[in-house]
Image (spheres, rainbow, N blue to C red):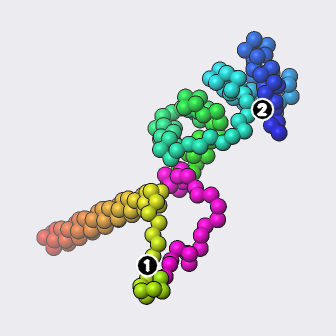
Amino acid sequence: MAKYSFEFKKQIVKAYLNGEGGYEYLAKQYDIPSFNNIKKWVLNYNAFGDEGLVRSRKQKKYSFEYKLHVVELYLTSEVSYQELAIQEGIRNPALIVKWVNDFRIAGPDALRPKKKGRKKPLSLKRKVTDTNATESIIVDTSAEYVKQLEDELLKLRIENAYLKELRRLRLEEETLLKKQRESSTASEEISN
């Protein structure tokens, strides 16, 4: 059960909107540990009406593209999680916090939908036919798996380009240092 009922939240929001007190005053009055809860309820009520105060019982599914869009919005703009949630119609700003943290830790792959259930052992993916004594392998060609492989390929290409550029810069630096050493030894010989 939710900690605070819909009726209780609405009563506090109405009290705030009627000017009966500020966030901190109402938090003390109604024995709520943090005034931020009241602030969040008021913002949700103003943005979504009564829907903003009701706890949703069903989990809404968001596509990978939408999650990536929201994360990019947060990272490129200077809005808070709460403001972005209201702007995008997401009633739970903690969801955006999770997406952003996952993105920062594991990159865009962390936002992809996960398959439910237990993973199949590798031995089941390989199928041997005894009739013609040839080995055939079942390959997962689902769009999700192909997208994962494309993303991994892109990451590896970027990493490869980065390492090549790093190697090139190091070689340039070494040749520059070698030239400086040669010119300094040549100038010492001339001065002697």
Image-based side of 92 in relation to 33, left or right: left
Q: Residue at x 56, y 42 (%)?
A: 62
Which kind of residue does numbered mark 2 sit on?
Answer: Ser
User: For the magenta stretch, what is the residue range?
Assistant: 105-128
Identify which residue is drawn at 66% across, 42% down. 59
Q: Which residue is mark 2?
A: 34
Task: Name the quadrant of the C terminus.
Answer: bottom left
Query: Which residue matches tag 1?
Result: 136
- The kind of secondary structure element at disc 1 is strand
Q: Which label lies toward us, 1 or 2?
A: 1
Q: Give the percent coordinates (x, y) of residue 186.
A: 16, 71
Which image quadrant for residue 183? bottom left
> 139 and 16: which one is in front?
139
Residue type, mark 1 in image: Ser
Q: Is residue 20 left or right of residue 129?
A: right
Marks 1 and 2 close (CB-CB < 8 Å) = no
